[in-house]
Every structure is written in C-alpha cells, then in structure tokens.
Amino acid sequence: MAKRIVYFDMDGVLCKFKKKYDEELKRNHSIKYPQATYGFFTSLEPHHIMIGLYKALEKNSNFEVHILTAPSIHNPLCYTEKRVWVEKHLGMDAVQRMVITQHKNLLKGDYLIDDHSTGRGQDKFEGKLLLVDEDNMNETVNNIINTIKDEVVDIL
Ligand SMILES: [Mg+2]
C-alpha cells in the first residue's frame, strides 16, 4: 500500500498561536497585527499532544508526514522563524518536509490537519481535511486518530 501523505498546519495546530496572539493584544491594545511582530513565531509554545501525533505518524511506515503552513506575509521574518521553530520542536527531518505557501490546495496528499477550513486553499485540498479545534486538542487528536484508523488498517 502506498504511504498516506499527511500534512500538519502550524499555527493553531502544532503551535499555540491563539495564546500568544491574545497575550500580545492584552499587552498592547493598539497593536493591529500581533503576528507581524518580529519574534512572534519563534516564541510560540508547542501543542505537545499534536507534536506527539506528528512524531507517532513520522515513525509509522504507513505514513509520510509533512508540514504545510501559510506565511504571515506582513512579517517577512516569519518564514525564517517558522523554520527555526520546526527545527527546535521537531528536528531537522521535519525541516526537510516543510512547505510554506498560501495555496495549500496545490499540494498532493491524503490528509490535511488544519484549524481553518478555508482561506488558504484548505477547502480545495484534494485529500481529506481534518479540522482542529485549538481549544479542545485532546478531543481533536482522538478524532483524528479514529478517522485515520477507520480508513487505514494497522496503524498506531
Ligand atoms: Mg492554522
């Protein structure tokens, strides 16, 4: 059987985007785009349960995992910061499997794990979109595992 290709989004999936975003807004009410601040993306905390899922699938020979993230185009350093973050939390193997694009629909694959269903081509992705609720990560990861289990035998 061909390996299943799985893409992981970063903001709101592997990284705690919302937490940092809200903290920055609280600190400075007049800031319009907290994510446009240099250093914003490197400082995001990881969602450990999602990192765990990434690593479990990475080790499983039925899957090929990649990172698929859209850039914050108003923060040119975000491209570098995302790369730095991935090396720190997932290692160089993940860096080699990292795609930064605003057009997620252009990538070939079976699953896209993302916290948004539209906006960056998610709705036109050829595989199945597995939607993430950042406020309910345990439930989200369980649902993802169940969905993948239903469709792929002998995993996890
Ligand atoms: Mg996201």
Image (cartoon, rainbow, N blue to C red):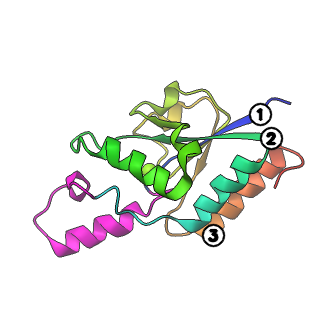
Q: Which residue lies furthest to the left in this view?
A: 30
Residue 62, which numbered label? 2
The kind of residue tagged 1 is Lys
Please state the horizontal and vertical placement of residue 104, each as a whole percent of the image: 48, 33
Disc marking residue 101: none
Q: Which amino acid does label 3 sit on?
A: Asn
Q: Indicate which disc, 3 or 1, sits on the residue closer to the N terminus.
A: 1
Residue bearing mark 3: 138
Contact between labelled residues 1 and 3, with CB atoms less than 8 Å apart: no
SS at circle 1: loop
The image quarter in which residue 73 lies = top left
35 over 118 or under it: above or below: below
Which residue is the site of mark 1? 3
Image-based side of 96 in relation to 76, left or right: right
Name the residue at 41% across, 45% down.
83
**Residue 139, percent across and down?**
64, 67
